[in-house]
Amino acid sequence: DGGITQSPKYLFRKEGQNVTLSCEQNLNHDAMYWYRQDPGQGLRLIYYSQIVNDFQKGDIAEGYSVSREKKESFPLTVTSAQKNPTAFYLCASSRDRGAYEQYFGPGTRLTVT
Amino acid sequence: AQSVTQLDSHVSVSEGTPVLLRCNYSSSYSPSLFWYVQHPNKGLQLLLKYTSAATLVKGINGFEAEFKKSETSFHLTKPSAHMSDAAEYFCVVSDPMTGTASKLTFGTGTRLQVTL
């Protein structure tokens, strides 16, 4: 059963702590993406990666970091430098330039207090 | 630069009546356009896509959309709403980047409510 998995579904952290969100895909997609979703807004791109060991900043990368050590995995770390980390985080992947649609995971809701 | 405007933040219809969710886009390129649906606390599911083939695009669950270049619109329709259609709908335009990635620009979403 192919798809994208994100874990955990809900995550709670205290302010000042770093937290890592998991994203795994078994679709053999080259590109992977992280988005943030806030109420009443569309999705905003945090980071993306086109190949292993390479990644690029999106529109709102400040306070976040990523790695891409394996094609299947693209974890996102929300650092203590992110001023407003409470949000719904979505991971996505896409096949190649000829197929621009992205496929999304179920999301992780992060709450920082 | 590309952008997407969803003209209604909230649409309410009765079950069995038609659905119309409106979207206008702006793009420097010949665009690829998508509609995604999101149920509460879930990820996004692709409903349909337009990539310069037929201007009337059919998607899943009876939805379809028509690409109108002269009006820069890509409205989503369904002849008869079902209770299970209640969700958030996003209109999205794609800008191809170099390499293997694509950059999606999302509208702010339209919440569809379906009443009995």
Image: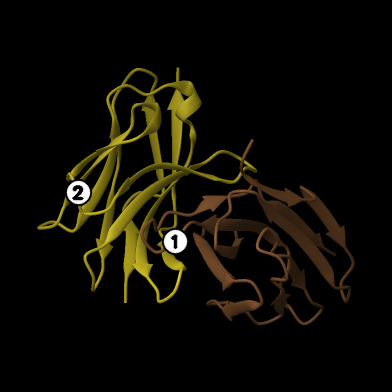
Chain colours: A brown, B yellow
Q: Does residue B60 lie above or below A28 as drawn? A: above
> The disc labelled 1 sits on which kind of residue?
Asp
- Give the residue displayed 55% in from the left and 63% down from the top: A30
- Where residue A20 sits in the image (x, y, percent)? 81, 66
Which residue is the site of mark 1? A96
Q: Does residue B90 lie above or below A41 as drawn? A: above
Task: Identify which residue, B55 or A82, lies in the foreground.
Answer: B55
Task: Identify which residue, A58 or A111, lies in the foreground.
Answer: A58
Q: Does residue B25 lie above or below A6 as drawn? A: below
Disc 2, SS: loop
User: The N terminus of chain B appears in which quarter of the rendering?
Assistant: bottom left
* Mark 2 or 1, closer to the camera: 1
Say which chain tag 2 marks: B
Say which chain tag 1 marks: A
Which residue is the site of mark 2? B53
- Give the residue displayed 72% in from the left and 77% down from the top: A65
Left or right? Give the position of A55 relative to B27.
Answer: right
Count of numbered labels shown in the rendering:
2
> The disc labelled 2 sits on which kind of residue?
Ala
Q: Would residue A49 be visible to someone looking at this image?
A: no
